[in-house]
Structures are given as C-alpha cells and as structure tokens.
Amino acid sequence: TRIRVDAVAHVEGGPLDLVYLIERPLLERLAFPFIQGTMELMATAVSMAGLTADQLDHVLLVGGSSRLPLVSSAVQAAVQRTPRRFDVDPDLAVCIGAALEAQRVTGRRSSAMHHLPTQLVDIVPHAIGLATAGGGYDKVIPKNSPLPAGGRRTYTTWRHEQEEMRFVVLQGDGTRADECARLGDFRVDGLPKKPAGDVVVELLLEVGADGLLRASARDLTTNQVRQYRARIQDGSPGE
C-alpha cells in the first residue's frame, strides 16, 4: 500500500510530502487494535438492540478503512456472514451522511438532497438521571433514547416540615453517582411545612432536538415550578 500525505512540513523550497510504502502484514498489525475495538462496539450495539448476530439481515460496510480485507474478515468472523456493500461507495456514504447532518443542523435545504430517502435520528449518548441517597444513581432517560426524550419521577419529603429539596442531575451509564458526570443541581424551596411524606414533588427531565436538557420540578401541593437548563455531553462522562 502506498501512503501519501501532502505538505507534512514546510522548508525553504516549499512543502514536503510524505510518501511511504507499507506492506499489508505491517498495516494489519497496526490496524488490528482499532478493528478489535470496533468489533467490541458492534457486539455491544447488537446486544443493546436486543438482537443476536444471527438475526441480522445484512452487514453494510462504509468508511474508507472498511476496504481493508482484515475488516471484512473480522466482521465475517463476528457475525458468521459475509459483509455486503450493495455497490455503495464507502467514502461517499460517509460524505453524504455528514452533508445530511449539516443540512439538518443548519436548517438549509439542498435540492440535491431532496431525492434521498433519509431519516436521521439523534439519540441521547449517555443516560441522564438523578443522584440518590447513599451515592446511588436513578436513570430517568435511558441511553440511546431518540430525541426528543424525557422522563418523570416523583419524590416525597423525608423530614418533618421539610421546606426544600435539592436535585443533582447526572449523565452517565454507571450505577453510582461518582461514576457519572455532573450536569448541575437545583433546588425546590418554599415547600409547605407538613409531616414527612405529605409533600410530593414531580421532576421532569427533557432533552430536546437542540441537545439542551431541561429540568423542571413541580410541587404538586402548591403547583410551584422550578426550571433548569444544561447542555448534554457528547463524549464519555469524565472526558
């Protein structure tokens, strides 16, 4: 394989290009850890969809690196079937997908894209929930929920004449609060002074198509509402 990277450095005479010939065994050794990681992600995606590999109708390879024979053989070993391309250009598929996403985000419609039967679905990359007593984590919006997404929880006071509640909003896929990223916290105050358990607060978490998290807490006794906004994270919590 011949690798060419233009203008990797600049000297007095102008830019220097990198041209390097690499044999397949070395290329495959370098690529193997990334391919192995991709196979693990693929297995996770299939499992989260509630499927098994033998239930897949087809496996479609896109992206320039899918041209590597090692990629096809790794996928075939994982799903016990030969990946197909359906005459899809692996590079063009990625370019069209990026263009469609840019069109959706900017709101600008291109006549060249109108003929394409597409459906873009944004999801919540990590679960969103609330910290609970003892360092626990209550997932209100599950991971991979299509946007817009939301969920509700109700909480009662746990002390006599308790006048406020504090909520800590988290994002992550762990089981404990300290394994997740903190998006923020807010308070609901002015609660009526009543015996423990008599005051009920309903919490609503919503993520819109704009990626903004909106949290609102309503005291069901007085109908008082508190609202909070934050932007959810695309990467792994802690990054």
Image (cartoon, rainbow, N blue to C red):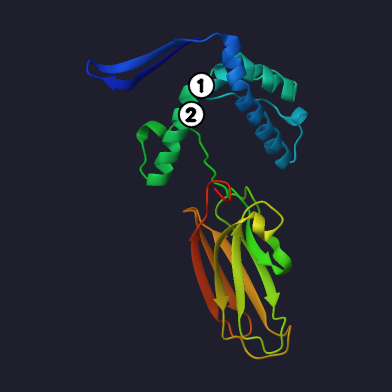
Residue 16 vs residue 133, the one in the foreground: 16
Classed neighbour count for the residue bearing mark 1: other residues with Cα under 10 Å, few (<14), some (14–19), many (≥20)? few
Question: Badge 1 is on which residue?
Answer: 64
Q: Secondary structure at mark 1?
A: helix
Furthest residue in direction left, as rendered: 12
Q: Are marks 2 and 1 in contact (CB under 8 Å)?
A: yes
Question: Badge 2 is on which residue?
Answer: 94
Residue 20 location (% of width, % of height): 44, 11
The three-letter amino acid code for the residue at tag 1 is Gly
Residue under the point 64% across and 77% down: 201
Residue 91 location (% of width, % of height): 47, 23
Which mark, residue 75? Answer: none
Residue under the point 70% across and 37% down: 44
Q: Is residue 133 left or right of residue 222?
A: right
Q: Is residue 166 left or right of residue 17?
A: right
Q: Is residue 129 visible?
A: yes
Q: Secondary structure at mark 2?
A: helix
Residue 141 vs residue 4, the one in the foreground: 4
Number of numbered discs on residues? 2
The three-letter amino acid code for the residue at tag 2 is Val
Reading the chain from its start, which is encountered first: label 2 or label 1? 1
Query: Can you say whether 78 is above or below 51 in the image?
Result: above
Classed neighbour count for the residue bearing mark 2: other residues with Cα under 10 Å, few (<14), some (14–19), many (≥20)? some
Quarter of image, res 47: top right
Residue 30 location (% of width, % of height): 58, 20
Query: Can you say whether 161 is above or below 103 in the image?
Result: below
Question: Could you give the CA–CA distance between mark 2 and mark 1, rounded to whole angstroms?
Answer: 9 Å
Query: Can you say whether 202 is above or below 46 in the image?
Result: below
Q: Is residue 86 visible?
A: no
Residue 41 location (% of width, % of height): 66, 35
